[in-house]
């Protein structure tokens, strides 16, 4: 078991290094100059060429862009390991780590419940649909319809009908404007929840349909397999057969969860844009617009670390849930 | 065991998410009612909510970092020596009580009795320090003064003498006087050169009418910057100005459409967003509580000139007949009416803003000016050698009004046979468009819309922006945003330089110079002035009234919080006029 | 079973090795990383993997019935048609597609207004010299007899713009599916056929690509690329959505390469490429067809999201672009639902039709699933 995880961790480190290097290179290989972009905000008609050069070098130095690429790469990893990711050009020159920390909370409280709830409920209902014709006839088409709906459309529809028309929930921003952010203030937390609901609903709905459909067809398939027939032939109860079918079907669903994380994050960006929700998705568009290298790299890296960690957790869960792998590993250890 | 472990996991996860889901539903009522004052940090009837200025995270209060500083950093915290009133065309003494030229020296009398927010006095030494910073830190925005002849400033009490070489840079100096802050020497002298211009200054020591509400945290999810009244502000005792709101919160702006929602709901009192169709909502939609600066057309003051800017080093844009054909082919009313529904005005052919209209030589315009004339455009196009190349016109993605405007332009140009495709790259502003796609090729762009020539008290910066030489590097980086169209006319640039060192009091000489420049401009058309972007302002009278208005002679102030307006023009006066609605 | 226990196999993190073949417990002694390409539930892994993912709407798991001879399109053409025409899901799905494809091809010719330049202004200067949305007595742009789906803020006819937009959406969907299919097949066949260290490297690469959030990558790249054409968008979608195809194809190839007919082909001296293309691929033809349909719908959905965020092609109108314009121009506040509901509904219907026909096709290809 130790060897198994050691190898996994090794592979994660390789993936992390690779992704980190891509993260470092992409903004730098692309044309465009962030310092120039930044300076364009405050050069006036009085600005002379000499003055511009002086400002340029002052800001290039402040942003650490005045050294050769190789040094920047070194600083990049050094910063990653020490939690220094530079200054955000587009966000008031604040440190990237604090900018990300502020936004990440909002993205996480949106993503984690949406993913988990969609997964759990979707699988449950999908499995139920597999054995009840009535449920199947309703869940299946609805599930497919949700799955066929483009993210932006679902988000706009939710915003329109529940927000703009019914006025049940606010659209826009992460909390009421008359509050100062403070996670110890009950009014603030309530306000955050209130603003959180619609984007959450959007992300939840789109993934929910997929899980339900996937689970339904997996369980139906499992019920048709030889072992299921054999069990039935032995006189096992329908209940027992279904439980086995569900368990077997749950495994591919779990690995599916790992694969779709990146996509859910994408859908999250759309939801954050429609609802003007102050999370990472919203932030990354701003960063890209202002060629904010450091912030872009920081967010990208944050997301990759998130995906890798989530994958690792799923790996462990997989081992725990699947008796075969667990037994096999214990065997290997012995 | 496995089963129990798994179901325990599933159960706890389900409970967690169910709880997460239930809380907002249960908390529905309290959240909905959170507008009542008892719940809020900022009582609604004591707070002015503004929006439309800040587009990213708040948290930067460095007045020298114009790219990142928050709304109010200039104006509410830091103040200039003079203000400029574009509506009445005059300068208003602010931290200075007076200033005057004597030969190559300029003498400033600094106002007595001004205190920094830490209790120390603002003196001539602070003013001299601020000016001299140009000599020690070339990255401060006024370091150009050194290159045009600033020798240094000396203070004697509250009298500051500034020395220049001859001839002194009258225009550049005038721009400094009303655009740049007076800094606390005790604070800035302790900073590194880089921090002086790019530090975030989150504990500002300031002189202005408000101070930051303490205890605010700054991150990307912070949605507003809040100020509270500074009880010791000099303006109250010396000018009788005071604010009737206790707090001012500037809300971060993420998009115009969200801005419209919040404004119509009364969440914002003072909006400097472009809100499409606002005039129709006022007239037809029954929103009587909405006020604009002009009660009727054009509703908004003009803020800057939107130019159609062509890459004049690239064929066919390098041909003057082509540029003329383009200018004559575009019907400005398609933009001012079609896109803006009448809340902006078409530009005059020279393009100077209405506050500078006295500098436009009408005889020159009559002789060389252009107007919408498709037949003439076709004739000029025939002379231009245009061979049907496909061109692009670019504006930044998300600048919705401009995106619509360039579609109108493309359609107009198409009707005389010029093929132009609108494109909307995701960039942070106009200047990156000119280096777009490939920084090593200055031929990257064909046409863009540019409005970088902001409001000014003289025509000088407008023409300097057009004619400044040398032309910048390959991606315009060294031009620093000047002469983006890459047009070379040394004669015109010499006239611009001459204007810069002509005393502002010598109006006749200046008029003659500007008239010559205008004649060259209209004959060459390095830029095509199209319309004046509005100084978007909407006031909501639900909580506050007496917004600035052209129809009230005592309240004709600039209703704009943008950088370059608040703290340089008369916005502080406008804020002081506001009264509670109830 | 011939396992191929490369160290990187389980790398996947996201592929916690499928083990199940027939019944649970049968292969208890296998290490997860040593799991051979699975049959039965194994390939479901790849599909289950996609369940719920907007990127790859999963439909009914296409199955390559384990043990049973793969269905060959050619040999059983008549039987196929017989079942196809009697499958209501397939008929429904294909009818929906037919309507939209015809609309995309002929719609612009028949569009009531030839105005579709761009969704935000319909490309025409306004005749009425006022923002049409507010012309006359206020909100008069509701759907009406003249404008079946109403008008945009700028007086563009929503129906006409939608008809133009369909083309771009279909084009990008097709290009994306094509590129993803090509990359996925090439890598999947290579990894599955060659095995060994090459397989390990390809698996590692696949897993790295899976961890990269595509949208975020596009935002970064898209911010710098000047020309956004449907081709660029199609290539990008293809380049980021192939991993699950590669995995599925690899798994299938693993299974097939142990079959007798492949051994026969090998004995006859055929080269690897030839065996993959002439013996293995045809055996997966029905499966690959279903994979393509899924890729097609996921590419279209992705393109809508990208266009919506302003990352799509700039010179053409698309459904996502329409929704973007609607949002930017305050359609939510102005209650102009007809500006963004119809384009999204059209997209949802198109993908819904594809998913339903996919179930139908699955049933036709795989006799086991047919309703008796």
Image (cartoon, rainbow, N blue to C red):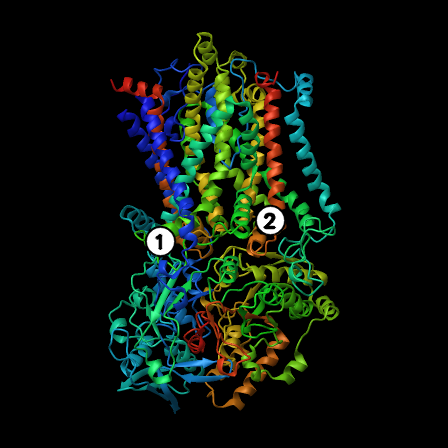
Q: Quadrant of the N terminus of chain C?
A: top left
User: How far from the left and from the top, in percent, is residue C327?
Assistant: 55, 53
Chain of the residue under label 2: C
Q: Would you say C307 lies left or right of A26 here?
A: right
- Give the alpha-carbon distance from disc 2 to disc 1, as whole Å: 34 Å
| Closest to the observer, C245 or C165 | C165
Residue A144 position by quadrant: top right
Q: Is residue C316 visible?
A: no
User: How far from the left and from the top, in percent, is residue A329?
Assistant: 30, 21
Farthest-out residue, top: A234
In this view, B89 is above or below B336 = below
Farthest-out residue, bottom: B102
Q: Secondary structure at mark 2?
A: helix
Q: Is residue C19 visible?
A: yes
Task: Please determine if labels 2 and 1 lie on a single subunit.
Answer: no
Residue C340 disc label: 2
Total count of labels:
2
| Closest to the observer, C331 or C210 | C331
Q: Would you say B420 lies left or right of B188 here?
A: right
Q: Quadrant of the C terminus of chain C?
A: top right
Disc 1 packing (10 Å; few <14; some 14–19; many ≥20): many
User: How far from the left and from the top, in percent, is residue B31?
Assistant: 41, 52
User: How far from the left and from the top, in percent, is residue A267?
Assistant: 48, 43
Q: Nearer the viewer, mark 2 or mark 1?
A: 1
Disc 2 packing (10 Å; few <14; some 14–19; many ≥20): many
In this view, C35 is above or below C185 = above
Q: Secondary structure at mark 1?
A: helix
Tell me the residue at 64%/63% (across/down): B409
**Residue tagged 1:** A187
């Amino acid at each position: 078991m130790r060897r198994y995880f050691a190898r996994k961790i090794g592979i994660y480190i390789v993936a992390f290094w690779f992704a980190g290097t891509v993260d470092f290179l992409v903004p730098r290989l692309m044309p465009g100059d962030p310092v120039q972009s930044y300076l364009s905000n405050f050069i006036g008609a009085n600005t002379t060429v000499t003055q511009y050069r002086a400002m340029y070098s002052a800001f290039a130095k402040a942003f650490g862009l005045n050294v050769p690429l190789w040094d920047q790469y070194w600083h990049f990893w050094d910063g990653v390991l020490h939690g220094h990711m530079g200054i955000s050009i587009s966000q008031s020159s604040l440190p990237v780590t604090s900018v990300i920390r502020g936004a990440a909370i909002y993205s996480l409280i949106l993503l984690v419940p949406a993913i988990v709830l969609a997964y759990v409920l979707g699988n449950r209902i999908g499995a139920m649909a597999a054995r009840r014709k009535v449920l199947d006839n309703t869940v299946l088409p609805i599930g497919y319809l949700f799955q066929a709906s483009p993210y932006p459309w679902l988000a706009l529809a939710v915003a329109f009908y529940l927000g703009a028309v019914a006025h049940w929930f606010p659209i826009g921003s992460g909390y009421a404007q008359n509050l100062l952010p403070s996670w110890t203030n009950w009014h603030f937390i309530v306000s955050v929840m209130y603003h959180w609901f619609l984007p959450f609903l959007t992300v939840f709905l789109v993934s929910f349909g997929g899980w339900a459909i996937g689970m339904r067809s997996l369980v139906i398939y499992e019920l048709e397999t030889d072992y299921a027939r054999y069990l039935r032939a032995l006189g096992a109860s329908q209940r027992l057969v279904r439980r086995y079918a569900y368990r077997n079907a749950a495994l591919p669903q779990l690995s599916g969860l790992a694969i779709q994380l990146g996509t859910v994050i994408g859908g999250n960006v759309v939801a954050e844009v429609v609802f003007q929700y102050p999370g990472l998705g919203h932030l990354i568009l701003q960063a890209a617009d202002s060629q904010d290298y450091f912030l872009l790299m920081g967010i990208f890296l944050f997301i990759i670390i998130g995906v890798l960690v989530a994958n690792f957790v799923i790996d462990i869960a997989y081992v725990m849930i699947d008796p075969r792998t667990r037994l096999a590993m214990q065997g290997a250890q012995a | 065991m496995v089963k129990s472990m798994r179901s325990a996991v599933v159960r706890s996860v389900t409970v967690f998410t169910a709880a997460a889901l239930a809380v907002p539903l249960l908390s529905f009522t309290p959240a909905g009612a959170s507008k009542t004052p008892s719940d809020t940090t900022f009582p609604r009837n004591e707070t002015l909510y503004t929006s439309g200025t800040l587009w990213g995270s708040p948290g930067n209060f460095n007045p020298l970092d114009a790219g990142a500083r928050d709304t109010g950093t200039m104006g509410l915290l830091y103040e200039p020596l003079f203000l400029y009133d574009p509506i009445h065309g005059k300068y208003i003494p602010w931290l200075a009580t007076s200033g005057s030229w004597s030969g190559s020296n300029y003498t400033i009398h600094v106002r007595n009795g001004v205190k920094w927010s830490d209790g120390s006095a603002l003196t001539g030494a602070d003013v001299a320090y601020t000016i001299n910073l140009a000599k020690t830190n070339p990255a401060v925005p006024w370091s150009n003064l050194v290159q045009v002849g600033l020798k240094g400033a000396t203070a004697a009490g509250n009298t500051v003498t500034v020395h220049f070489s001859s001839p002194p840079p009258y225009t550049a100096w005038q721009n400094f006087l009303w655009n740049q802050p007076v800094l606390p020497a005790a604070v800035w002298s302790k900073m590194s050169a880089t921090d002086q211009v790019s530090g975030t200054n989150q504990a500002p020591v300031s002189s202005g009418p408000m101070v930051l509400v303490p205890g605010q945290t700054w991150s990307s999810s912070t949605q507003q910057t809040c100020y509270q009244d500074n009880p010791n502000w000099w303006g109250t005792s010396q000018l009788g100005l005071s604010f009737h709101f206790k707090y001012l919160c500037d809300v971060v702006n993420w998009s115009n459409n969200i801005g419209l929602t919040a404004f119509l709901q009364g969440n914002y009192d003072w909006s400097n967003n472009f809100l499409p169709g606002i005039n129709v909502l006022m007239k037809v939609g029954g929103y009587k509580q909405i006020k604009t600066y002009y009660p009727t057309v054009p509703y908004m003051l003009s803020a800057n000139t939107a130019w159609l800017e062509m890459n004049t080093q690239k064929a066919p844009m390098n041909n003057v007949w082509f540029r003329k054909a383009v200018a004559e082919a575009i019907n400005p009313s398609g933009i001012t009416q079609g896109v803006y529904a009448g809340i902006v005005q078409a530009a005059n052919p020279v393009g100077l803003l209405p506050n500078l209209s006295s500098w436009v030589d009408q005889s020159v315009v009559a002789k060389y000016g252009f107007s919408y004339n498709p037949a003439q455009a076709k004739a000029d196009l025939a002379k231009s050698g245009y061979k049907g190349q496909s061109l692009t016109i670019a504006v930044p993605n998300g600048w919705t009004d401009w995106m619509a405007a360039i579609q109108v332009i493309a359609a107009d140009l198409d009707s005389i046979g010029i093929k132009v495709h609108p494109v909307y790259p995701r960039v942070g502003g106009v200047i990156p468009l000119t280096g777009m796609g490939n920084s090593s090729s200055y031929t990257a762009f064909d046409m863009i819309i540019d409005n970088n020539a902001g409001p000014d008290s003289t025509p000088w910066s407008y023409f300097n922006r057009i004619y400044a030489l040398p032309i910048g590097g390959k991606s315009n980086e060294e031009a620093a945003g000047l002469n983006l169209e890459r047009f070379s006319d040394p004669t015109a640039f010499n006239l611009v330089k001459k204007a810069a060192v002509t005393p502002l009091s010598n109006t006749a000489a200046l008029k003659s110079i500007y008239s010559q420049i205008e004649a060259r401009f209209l004959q060459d058309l390095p830029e095509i002035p199209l319309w004046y972007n509005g100084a978007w302002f909407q006031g909501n009278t639900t909580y506050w009234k007496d917004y600035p208005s052209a129809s009230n002679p005592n309240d004709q102030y600039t209703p704009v919080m943008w950088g370059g307006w608040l703290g340089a023009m008369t916005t502080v006066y406008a804020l002081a006029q506001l009264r509670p609605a109830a | 079973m011939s396992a191929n226990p490369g160290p990187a196999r389980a790398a996947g993190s996201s592929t916690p090795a499928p083990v199940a073949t027939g019944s649970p417990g049968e292969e208890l002694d296998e290490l997860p990383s040593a799991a051979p390409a699975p049959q039965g539930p194994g390939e479901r892994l790849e599909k289950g993997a996609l369940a719920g993912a907007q990127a790859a709407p999963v439909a009914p798991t296409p199955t390559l019935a384990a043990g049973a001879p793969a269905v060959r399109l050619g040999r059983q053409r008549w039987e196929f048609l017989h079942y196809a025409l009697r499958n209501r899901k397939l008929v429904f799905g294909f009818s929906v597609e037919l309507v939209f494809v015809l609309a995309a091809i002929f719609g612009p010719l028949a569009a009531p207004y030839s105005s579709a330049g761009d969704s935000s202004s319909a490309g025409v200067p306004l005749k009425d010299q006022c923002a049409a949305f507010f012309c006359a007595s206020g909100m008069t742009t509701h759907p009406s007899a003249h404008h079946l789906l109403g008008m945009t803020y700028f007086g563009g006819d929503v129906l006409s713009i939608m008809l133009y937009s369909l083309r771009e959406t279909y084009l990008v969907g097709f290009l994306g599916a094509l590129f993803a299919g090509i990359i996925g097949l090439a890598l999947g066949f290579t990894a599955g056929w060659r095995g060994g260290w090459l397989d390990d490297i390809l698996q590692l690469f696949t897993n790295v690509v899976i961890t990269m959030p595509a949208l975020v990558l596009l935002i970064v790249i898209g911010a710098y690329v000047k020309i956004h054409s449907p081709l660029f968008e199609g290539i990008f979608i293809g380049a980021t959505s192939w991993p699950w195809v590669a995995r599925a194809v690899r798994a299938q190839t693993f299974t097939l390469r142990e079959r007798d007919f492949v051994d026969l082909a090998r004995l006859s001296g055929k080269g690897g490429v030839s065996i993959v293309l002439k013996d293995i691929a045809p055996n997966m033809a029905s499966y690959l067809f279903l994979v393509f349909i899924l890729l097609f719908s996921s590419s279209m959905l992705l393109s809508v999201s990208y266009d919506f965020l302003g990352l799509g092609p700039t010179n053409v109108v698309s459904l996502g672009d329409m929704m973007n314009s609607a949002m930017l121009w305050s359609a939510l506040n102005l209650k102009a639902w007809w500006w963004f509901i119809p384009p999204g509904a059209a997209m949802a219907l198109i993908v819904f039709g594809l998913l339903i026909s996919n179930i139908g096709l699955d049933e036709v290809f795989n006799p086991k699933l047919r309703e008796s």
